[in-house]
Amino acid sequence: MTTTVYVLGSGTPEPTPERFGSAFAVDVDGEVLMVDCGPAATWKLVKAGLAPTQVGTLFFTHHHFDHDVDYPCFLLTRWDQGAGLVEPLHAIGPAPTSLLTERLVGPDGAFFADIHARVNWSGSQGIWAHRGGTLPRTPPRVRTTDIEAGHEHRGDSWSMRSALAIHAQPWLDSLSYRLETSDGSIVFTGDTEPCDSVRELARGADIMFSMCWNTNAAHTRYREGLCTLEGAVSMASDAGVGTLVLVHTGANVSNPQTVDAALLGMGDTYGGRVVLADELMHLTLSRGQLSVGPTAGLLRP
Ligand SMILES: [Zn+2]
């Protein structure tokens, strides 16, 4: 068995040529799930060699646009390409996951005109049938579950547990997740400030993908609800995480030299590995052994 995480989005709300938004795909021995669906996640998923129709479950950490703005693109592409031959997606996350879905692809949702046209126009019906679908063409079907901290969801060969992430409350509920497979355990912090609920969730994990907004030297006034490099390293150290992967990296932490210098400045705070993620990097766990490709983002082996 292998578990591979594809970093689809490793940036922030600020677009740069290298990074934009947050999204991950995870292939657990052929069963594919996603965590967040930020800008261009659908396109990056295909660039990673995966099809939207392969994804069965999508988890949201929270509903800031840098984590969910590609959701309508993903739903409509999956529906159009799936031709009624794949099971409905199960979208799971904090509220308003269900409401958002309904307002996007429900009967009165934002994309009603496109859906109405594709269901009823003979040209689109022909494409549907050509892809193997049976007529009449049906509108998108999505299963949704709004969850809170402490929820556990089980797939065939994995489980995903949620914990409180401290971010933009009370305006937005935010969650972190821990994925368990027979290959190991992987934590996605989502957006959070360093907090005990994430430390507890991450205890002993093989990998933790942590938000890393900036080093503490820069923009200290923006630290509330956010995690800096120092915060990510300290949480990884406290939780005994094997490998810390820096994602959601702001401009000051997108440069390996900057991160390396900052890590050196921290001394021996953390004994594990640190990886600065690039978009389309993948990390494969197989029976606790980690390999990273295709880029060399390893900073502290
Ligand atoms: Zn956020």
Image (cartoon, rainbow, N blue to C red):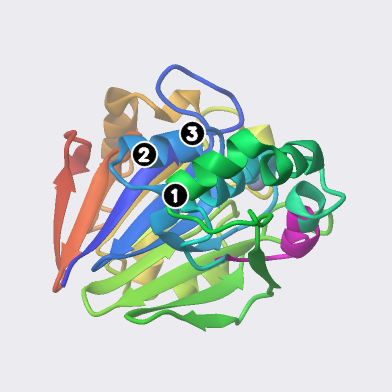
Amino acid at pointer 2: Val
Q: Quadrant of the N terminus?
A: bottom left
In screen coordinates, is 152 left or right of 294?
right
Q: Can residue 212 be seen by looking at this rendering?
A: no
Q: Earlier in the sequence, mark 3 or mark 2?
A: 3
On the image, the x and y values in percent for residue 236 come to: 37, 61
The quarter of the displayed image where residue 202 is located: bottom left
Amino acid at pointer 3: Gly
Judge: label 2 CB < 8 Å from ligand 1.
no
Mark 1 crowd level (few <14, some 14–19, many ≥20, 10 Å Cα): many
Front-most of residues 24 and 117: 117
Front-most of residues 5 and 192: 5
- For label 3, the residue is 11
- Residue at image position (17%, 47%) is 292
- Residue at image position (16%, 34%) is 296
Residue 52, numbered label? 1
Q: Earlier in the sequence, mark 1 or mark 3?
A: 3
Q: Is residue 278 magenta?
A: no
Front-most of residues 34 and 115: 115
Numbered range of the magenta stretch: 89-101
| Element under disc 2 | helix
| Element under disc 3 | loop
User: Exactly how many numbered labels are in the figure?
Assistant: 3
- For label 2, the residue is 46
Q: Can residue 110 be seen by looking at this rendering?
A: yes
On the image, the x and y values in percent for residue 263 come to: 30, 39
How far separated are the C-alphas under marks 3 and 2? 18 Å
On the image, the x and y values in percent for residue 75 come to: 59, 49
The quarter of the displayed image where residue 208 is located: bottom left
In the displayed structure, would residue 105 be above or below residue 14? below
